[in-house]
Image (cartoon, rainbow, N blue to C red):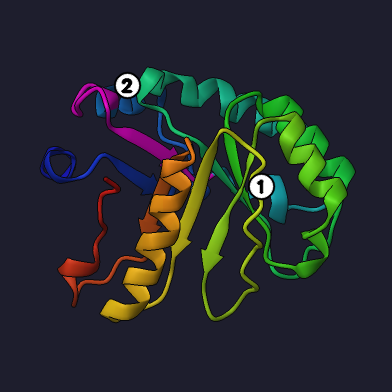
Amino acid sequence: MLAYYAERLNGVELNGTFYQLPPVTTLAGWAGQVHQDFRFCCKASRGLTYSAAAFDKAGLAATLGERLGALGDRLGPTLVQWPPGRQRDEQLLERLLTAFARPAAVEFRHESWFCAPVYDCLRRHGAALCRTDAEEWPLAPMTETGQFAYVRLRRSYERPALERWRRELRALAAGGSVVHVYFKHDPEGPERAGFMLE
């Protein structure tokens, strides 16, 4: 499926890496199957944000960043997701982004994170504030913090809503940002699988 997918799109968000990181040989093999402009955006391990306080999150972030290096220049930003119940913890965010040492997009599902000190931390690390359009969580504000934008569209969209998103995303791209856009898998609507920015 990967070769077929890569013929039609220029990136994929990998969900499986949230649960278990593939071996280095598998990652390198994936990188060898796609064209030079294709990017793998991997979800970071859930251990970074879902585990108990005593867990070595910074150590895991460093290991994760090193392992994902096997994708070489096919590696896009890594998505770091925070659970809905996890409120703002700037110190942990700082430690994780420092240890990870790779481009990241950060998805917050609690409103306490949407504030200037958090945006400043993201900017220091060149990390993007992920905008996720979903019914369950608040939509992050349009705040540029990195050299790229990361948007997750998690609903079933009719044409007018898609056009609104298309205009917003094209405006981001016209401003110089690389824009990573991912739709929720929708087996009933292949026409909604994605669109390319021009």
Quarter of the image where one finds residue 88: bottom right
| Residue 42 belongs to the span the image colors magenta | yes
From where the camera sits, is residue 56 visible? no
Q: CA distance from mark 2 to mark 1?
A: 23 Å
Q: Position of residue 118 (x, y in %)?
A: 81, 48
Q: Which residue is drawn at the image coordinates 18% and 39% (left, top)?
A: 6
Horizontal arrangement in the rendering, residue 131 relative to residue 123 (left or right): left
In the image, residue 19 above or below residue 113 = above
100 or 174, which is in the foreground? 174
Q: Which residue is drawn at the image coordinates 81% and 33% (left, top)?
A: 95
| Residue 50 belongs to the span the image colors magenta | no
In the image, residue 7 above or below residue 168 = above
Q: Please report the bounds of the magenta region as a residue range.
A: 31-43
Judging by the rendered image, the residue that carries numbered circle 1 is 47
Judging by the rendered image, the residue that carries numbered circle 2 is 28
121 or 54, which is in the foreground? 121
